[in-house]
Image: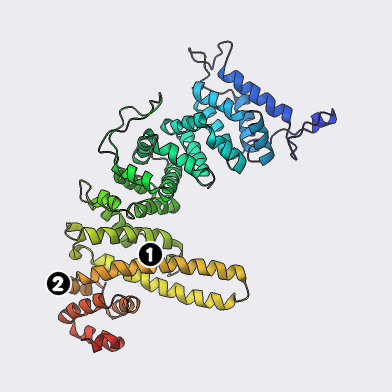
Amino acid sequence: MDRNPSPPSSEAEEEEGGGDAVGNTVYSKHWLFSILTRLIEVISPEKTEPTVSPEGIQTELDEEMENDICKVWDMSMDEDVALFLQEFNAPDIFMGVFAKSKCPRLTEICVGILGNMACFQDICMSISKDENLGQVLLQRLCDSDSPTLLETSRLLLTCLSQPEVANVWVERIRENPSVYDCVCFIMSSSTNVELLVKVGEVVDKLFDLDEELMLNWIKNGTCRSVGPSVDDSPEELPDFKIVPCILEAAKQVRSDNPEGLDVYMHILQLLTTVDEGIQAIVQAPDGGKETWSLLYDLVCHELCQPDDPPIIVQEQKTVLASILSVLSAMFASQTEQEYTKMRKNMPLIGSLIRILQYMEGCGKRSVDNSKESEQEETGRADLNEEDFHLKILKDICCELLSNMLQELTKENTLEGLHQGHLNEQTCSCAFQNLLPLYFASVESFLEVLREADQTLADNLEKRFPSLKVHA
C-alpha cells in the first residue's frame, strides 16, 4: 500500500491570524474539524448518491474522503492530535460510524484511529471506561472484514497492555461470551497470518492477565455460548473448543511467522498451568495426538536442527521452552497414550540432547561476552536476561529428558544407539546436565544401557565417578 500523503499544515490559516495549529504540531484544527463534520455527513446522508445503498448508507468511500480520513489516521499517532480528536468527541462520532456504516473500509479506518489514540494513557482510560463504546468495539470482533478485525485486535491489545485499564477489558470480555466464539472462529478459519498473530497476542495477554477467564474459555464448547447478536457475525457458529482452534492457527502461522508461532505455543503453555488446561489437551477426542504430533514435528524437524549453528538456540529459546513445557506436561499425564510410547519418540530424545549441546555452546559464548563487556552496564543487563531465558529452557528440557530416560527399555535403547540418537557424546551431555538433580533418572537409564551396550555404560561411569560409586 502506498504511503498516505502528508497531512495539511496550518501555515495558511496561521498567516490569517487564526491560531489554528493543533498543539505544538503544524496540523490544522479547522481542517481536522472539517473532516469530522464530513464524517458525520457520510453516515447521515441527505440524498442518495451513486455509492449509496438503497437504505441510504454509503457502502464505499469516495477517493477524496478516503484520502482525507487516512491522513487523520496517520496524524492520530501524534498525542496533540489524539487529544484534539478526543476533545471534539471523535470517539462518539466513530460510534455512529460503527452503528450505521456499511462501508468496511470506513469502519477499519475509524477503529485504527481509535487504536492510535489509545496509545496515550489518559485517552485510553477514557475510551476504556465508556461502556457503550467498549461493547461496540467487542462486537467488531464478529465483523467479517479482515482489516477491521486486525485493527480491532490491535486496539484491544493496546488497552490490555495498559495496567490502569486492563482489568476493565478483561471483565468486559468475561461478561461477553460472544467474544469467545468470534475469536475461536478467527483462529480456526482465517488464513490471514497477520490477523492470526494479532488475535493470538490478544488471547495470550488475556490468559496471562486472568486465570478465571482462561478457565472459562477452556470449559466452553460443552454448552452453547449466548451473547449479543451481531448482524454481520458468522452465521451458525459451531461449538468451538479452544485447543483445536489454537492448533489450527498455529499451523497457519508456523511457516510464515516465527513470532506468531511463539505466541500460540505460549498460549498452549499457559493452558498447562492449570489442571483443566492439561485435561483439555489430553482428553480431546484424539487423546491429544494432534497436539503431540505438531509439537514433536516442530522440535524434531524444524527448530534447532543439526545443520543449524548452536547460536540458533538463543533465537528460538522462548518458543522451545513453551513447546517442551507442553510436551512435558502431556508426557507426565498421558504415559499410556500410544503417541508417548518411547519406541516412537527416540528422535525426540535426540533433539532434547541437541538443544542441551547447543546451550552449552551459547553458555561459553555468554562467558566470553561477559568478559568483554565487564564495564558495560547495559551489556550485562542484556546478558543476564539471555542467561535467564536459557536457564528456563534448560530446566524444562532436563525435566522432560529425565522423565523420558526413565521409560526407556533395552529395545528402545538399542534402537536409539542404532539411529545415532544415543552415543557416548550425547549421553555425556545428558548426564552433565541432569546430574546431580536427576540422579535417580540417570541411574535408571544407566542400568538399561548396561544391558544394551556394556562398553558405553562403563565409559560413562568413568566420566561420572558418582555413578560408579552407586553401581
**In the image, is residue 126 above or below residue 62?**
below
In which quarter of the view is residue 458 placed? bottom left
Work out whether residue 112 can be spotted: no
Q: Residue 14 location in percent, x, y?
A: 82, 31
Quarter occupied by residue 193: top left
Horizontal and vertical percent position of residue 254? 38, 51
Q: Is residue 408 above or below residue 135?
A: below
Quadrant (top left, top right, bottom left, bottom right) of the N terminus: top right
The residue under the point 33% across, 57% down is 298
Mark 1 is surrounded, within 10 Å at the Cα level, by few (under 14), some (14 to 19) or many (20 or more) other residues, namely many
Image spot of residue 80 (x, y percent): 69, 39
Three-letter amino acid code of the residue under disc 1: Cys
Task: Tell me where residue 188 sits by quadrant.
Answer: top left
The residue tagged 1 is 304
Name the residue carrying label 2: 411
Q: Residue at x 52, y 39 (%)?
A: 155
Task: Name the quarter where the C terminus is drawn.
Answer: bottom left
Image position, residue 449 (x, y; %): 19, 79
Secondary structure category for the residue under label 2:
helix
The amino acid type, in three-letter code, at marker 2 is Glu
Earlier in the chain: of badge 1 and badge 2, it is 1
